[in-house]
Amino acid sequence: MQDARVRLTLLAVASLLLACGGCQFADMKPGAKSILEVFKQPTPAEAAAWSIDPYDPDKRYQGTLLLANAPFANEPVYIKVFTDNSRDVDPGVRAAAIRGIANHGSPDLVPLLVEHMKDADVSVRIEAARGLQRLHNPVAVPALIDAIDESKEPEVQVRAQAAEALGQYAQTRVVDVLIEALDDANLSMNQATLSSLRTLTGQDFGFDRAAWAAWNTSTKDTFAARSVYMYPVFSRDKDWYEYLPFVSGPPNETASTPAGLQPTAQ
């Protein structure tokens, strides 16, 4: 089945080449002169140069995002780019920089992510909440608790990402607020909250807040059946063009524990 898809993909590209003939690809990728160059990725040096372009926020965004998703960008020079760009005037650049911190940074950078949980731009707040799933530092707990409160955070995606991040903190106050958050009217928020409650307690009372509250009041050891927290990751099947030999596949990730999380961490 997969071989058939690959053959069809190659046939489609061949047809595109024949149809294009001598056409230019500059509209698809600036400077591209062939179908191969359309799919060619910028080099690390190009990405780094773009990330600090003082005149073009689009270049800074593209370069920062490329570095954020690169496997090698945990070196101090790149962490400096991410921390500097997290304060960029452009929200897209800030969001990309926060992703870089989340993917390559260390727990001591959590206060920077916490700061951006109050960013004016919702996409930045989403990235900050998602980043706090990947870096463990208890200083994040108060900000995450505030972020699942609908009266303080109107954007459901931020609330859901924050509820997911709380699943790594085995604290009584965390369980208490997660149970309260089951009253949120949004299903994605309910699912994220339930996921964290299951991880923290090993129990499953579904979306029944009363049952959770009754168990929480009666239990002697809330975290006796706790499981290891694994942050959610990006994963998808290949698009048609990603079957080509010169094109990278989707940037699928492997689930893991947050940086800094110890087996008995609170």
Image (cartoon, rainbow, N blue to C red):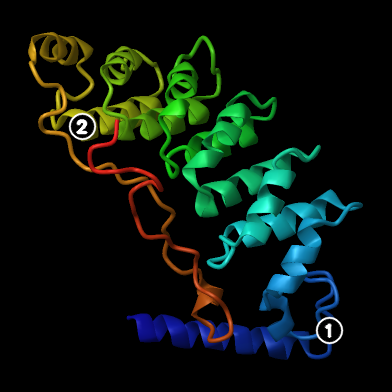
Q: Is residue 225 above or below residue 262?
A: above
Quarter of the figure that contains the N terminus: bottom left
Indicate the amino acid at tag 2: Arg
Residue assigned mark 1: 23
Indicate the amino acid at tag 1: Cys
Name the residue: 83% across, 69% down. Answer: 27
Q: Is residue 38 left or right of residue 244?
A: right
Quick check: can you spot residue 200? Answer: yes
Q: Secondary structure at mark 1?
A: loop
Question: How busy is the neighbourhood of tag 2: few (under 14 within 10 Å), some, or many (20 plus)?
Answer: some
Quick check: can you spot residue 42? Answer: no
Residue assigned mark 2: 198
Q: Earlier in the sequence, mark 2 or mark 1?
A: 1
Q: Which mark is residue 215?
A: none
Residue 203 spot, x, y in % from top left: 13, 28
Quarter of the figure that contains the C terminus: top left
Q: Secondary structure at mark 2?
A: helix
Q: CA distance from mark 2 to mark 1?
A: 56 Å
Residue 47 spot, x, y in % from top left: 73, 66
Q: Quadrant of residue 126?
A: top right
Residue 245 spot, x, y in % from top left: 53, 86
Q: Is residue 27 above or below residue 224?
A: below
